[in-house]
Amino acid sequence: MRNQYYPNLANPITINGVTFKNRIFGAPMSNPELDPDCHMRKEDLAFHENRARGGLATVAIGLGIVDPVGRVHTKEVTLYDVMSLPSLKEYANAMHRHNCIAVMELAHGGKYAGARSHDGAGDPLVLGPNNETNPDGLRVTSMTDEDIERVADCYADAAVLCQKAGIDMVLVHGGHGWLLGQFMSPTMNHRTDKWGGSLENRMRFPLLVIEKIRKACKNNMLIEYRMSGSEIIEGGYGIEEGIKMAEILDGKADIIHVSAGVHEDPDAFVVTHPSMFIEHGCNVHLAAEIKKHVKTPVATVGGLNDPDMMEQIIASGQADIVEIARQSICDPYFPEKAFSGRKDDITKCCRCFTCFYNYLTNRTFCCALNPVVGNELENKSGFPASEPKKVMVVGGGVGGMEAAITAAKRGHTVTLFEKNDRLGGQLLSEQYIPFKQDMYNFAKVLERRLKETNAEIRLNTEITAEDVAKLKADVVMVAIGATPVIPPIEGIDSPKVAGLLTLHSKEPQVGQKVVILGGGLVGSEAAIYLDGLGKDVTVVEMKDDWAADAYFMHKNAMNIYIRNSRIKIYTDTMAKAVTKEGLTCETKDGELLLEADTILLAAGMKTDQEFVNSFYNTADRVFMIGDCVKPGRVLEAVTLGYNRAIDV
């Protein structure tokens, strides 16, 4: 029986005797931390099992390294170590509890390996297609025939280890500039022997790997092959050669997984892992072209977060399978929600790179919009309160709503007060910004979830500490946000000056020439938005760098946009006065006048500490949430709101 909501997306697919329960696969996702022996911990297994529980047809563990020489960093599953078997078995069992296919990615860093796993005991051995020096300054040794045979055997041995663990499919990583992709690439492979030159020769190593896996696993292991449909780098191959590569793989792999890019190229990175400035499904066209030329099922990947778009991809024949990663972090249960008619409750990934940043810096699973991520073993939101209490929440931004939702679900009697006529707080300003639609959607999802609880919502209610105290609550949660910083400069009260509230309307009330006072993350994103509307935008920042508070991947994406735009950015520049002509500034080279019709304030936010402090002692327990503690990101507001409600 076909699903009434998503008949194509929910339709099972059988490949070489294995049935996948729907067409939404979990793209490879590696672990930010492992145990000291590089085996998966209970925390890692809990994270991946939660994704399986939510309805994915497969969950793939990324970066299982097949050879010690192939390690790129220190937190990759060591598939060359038989002692990885117990955790791999636990992983497979966890997937199978939810009728989810267990997948392990087989990878080798090739010429990019070595440096990041270097222990300081001399230069590591780095192997690749050619003799060269890699970007980290390490000498790369061209692989001999014996090296190639040995590494191909390593792939086969790793597949056998996965088979022993009960894993159903291996995903051979031949894209994004990893070892097999290096051999496939005419840009990276300069060999003149049988492993280089013609496309047939460049594909010889990947085919050898597939052949050895088939033989070692006695044809009882499914093989998904990941490739870049286009390298999208200067001098790299395009879709025409990508099609020919896929034709060579046709009938040899069980699934051809079409991605894009070379991971080490900053410009390509934001296409391989699409930023919020790139359209959703930006790489689908590559899979669609390849699918026209092969019989093997084709999977597509790249910034997908909407089940309606996924359904259309399958229904139109652009791909047989859609693969997602970040969306399954943001809302692990989105497949089940979609297939049961609850798509309005799906939290859509906003592609803010919070997960990437924390993965690389803090070595934790994290999501700006999902406070459970990284805490799956400790998640207590489903635990009822031991003693139901009367809870007051002051403020209806995302932090306040998350607190109210969680407290209400746990059995408390909740009343939320919001001074405005709408819930959502600062995220309401994202409503008309194209690349921030998923953030606005998050606020609307929280609003719907809140209304589905028994919480009482009082809009247009500006409440003081004295009012709250009279209500005699057991718990008060203060989530009143912060207020904009207004620089103390001459003329700041000019009608030329506007706050970020002007972005709340469909057509911002700003002139043609806009100077943005403040070049942090908020100001920089506002510049991109206004540039997209055709405005002449200039950003003024007193620090020596713009968007210094942005995650580095997100800043890279902004930089790519800005360098191709008309936006001007002045750093080390101090605003002095608003004049009839515009904004007068002081720079290292002297005074500067920036002509402006509108000066948009984006100089940061500040906490009204006196007002916040007035709420202390209004109840036996008082919690502060979000920007009223310290102006910050959505991540901090949502996480604090969730955790404070767990504490009650």
Image (cartoon, grey):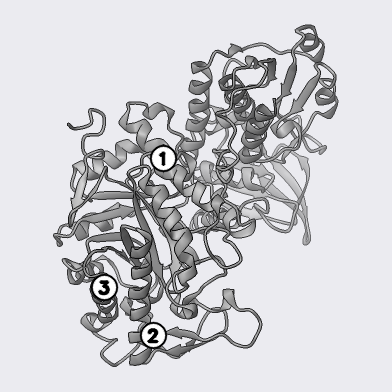
What percent of the width, then of the height, locates residue 323?
34, 50
Q: Tell me the quadrant of the picture where the C terminus can be found.
A: top right
- Residue 53 is labelled as 1
Q: Residues within 10 Å of mark 1 (few under 14, many from 20)?
A: many
What is the number of the mark on residue 230?
A: none
- Quarter of the image for the N terminus: give it: top left
| Corner quadrant of residue 261 | bottom left
Tag 3, which secondary structure? Answer: helix
Q: Is residue 3 above or below residue 319?
A: above
Residue 396 lies in quadrant: top right
Three-letter code, disc 1: Arg
Q: Which residue is mark 2?
A: 129
Q: Is residue 579 left or right of residue 246?
A: right
Please rate how many residues cluster around mark 2, counting C-alpha atoms within 10 Å: few if below 14, some from 14 to 19, many from 20. Answer: many
Q: Amino acid at mark 3?
A: Ile
Which of the 4 quarters of the picture holds residue 180? bottom left
As measured in the structure, the alpha-carbon distance from the residue carrying label 1 to the one carrying label 2 is 41 Å
Instruction: Report the Cα–Cα distance between label 2 and label 3.
Output: 18 Å
Q: Measured along the vertical axis of the image, is residue 579 above or below residue 159? A: above
- Give the structural element (helix, strand or loop) at label 2: loop
> Residue sitting at 33 percent across and 89 percent down?
191
Return the residue nearer the eye: 576 or 334: 334
Residue 637, horizontal then vertical, whole percent: 65, 35
| Frontmost residue, 188 versus 487 | 188
Look at 34% across and 69% down and name the residue there: 159
Q: Earlier in the sequence, mark 1 or mark 2?
A: 1
- The mark that comes first in sequence, 3 or 1, is 1
The secondary element bearing badge 1 is classed as: helix
In 3D space, how far apart are the residues under numbered discs 3 and 1 (Cα atoms)?
31 Å
- Is the residue under label 3 in contact with that under label 2 (CB below 8 Å)? no
Number of marks in the image?
A: 3
Residue to which mark 3 is pinned: 210
